[in-house]
Amino acid sequence: MVEYEQRVAKIEQALDEPRQSYSKVKERLMELEIEKEEQARAFDMLKQARQKERDEFKEELKQVKAMGYEYAEQVKNEMAVRIEKQVEMLESLLEDKKAMQAQVE
């Protein structure tokens, strides 16, 4: 009878080993699934952060371009005023030259 009980015990032990292995595999699979979900969430958060950075950069770029256009327009207007003053001065010098030539003759 003892031998029979020992055989039964060995058989039960042999049956328990695959169950334990299956439980361990199932547990590890669940851990990996959780890890995968966490990594997916982290990846989504990273994508959102990168998109936000891109949007902010685009907005800053628009502002800088607008400022550049305003500055260019301001410089253009200042140069136009300077050129106009130089043209007036040249015209005045030419008139003075003509007047001096007329006096010399």
Image (spheres, rainbow, N blue to C red):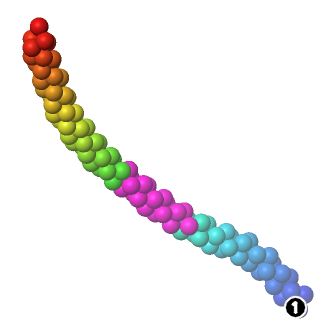
Please state the horizontal and vertical placement of residue 58, each as a whole percent of the image. 33, 47
Report which quarter residue 65 is drawn in.
top left
Residue situated in front as seen by the camera: 99 or 2? 99
Q: Secondary structure at mark 1?
A: loop
Residue 5 left/right relative to 88 = right
* Tag 1: amino acid: Met
Residue situated in front as seen by the camera: 4 or 26? 26
Q: Which residue is mark 1?
A: 1
Q: Which residue is painted at 39% across and 55% down in the image?
A: 53
Residue furthest to the bottom in view is 2
Magenta portion: prevailing SS class: helix
Q: The C terminus appears in which quarter of the rendering?
A: top left
Residue situated in front as seen by the camera: 56 or 27? 56
Report which quarter residue 45 is drawn in.
bottom left
At label 1, counting other C-alpha atoms closer than 10 Å, the crowd grade (few under 14, some 14-19, many 20 or more) is few
Residue situated in front as seen by the camera: 57 or 8? 57
Residue 17 left/right relative to 48 = right
Residue 26 left/right relative to 10 = left
Residue furthest to the top in view is 105
Q: Which residue is painted at 45% across and 59% down in the image?
A: 46
Task: Please say if 56 is above or below 100.
Answer: below
Number of numbered discs on residues:
1
Please state the horizontal and vertical placement of residue 72, each as a whole percent of the image. 25, 38
Residue 71: say if magenta. no
| Residue 7 visible in the displayed image | yes
Q: Which residue is painted at 9% across and 11% down in the image?
A: 102
Find the magenta span and give its range.
35-54
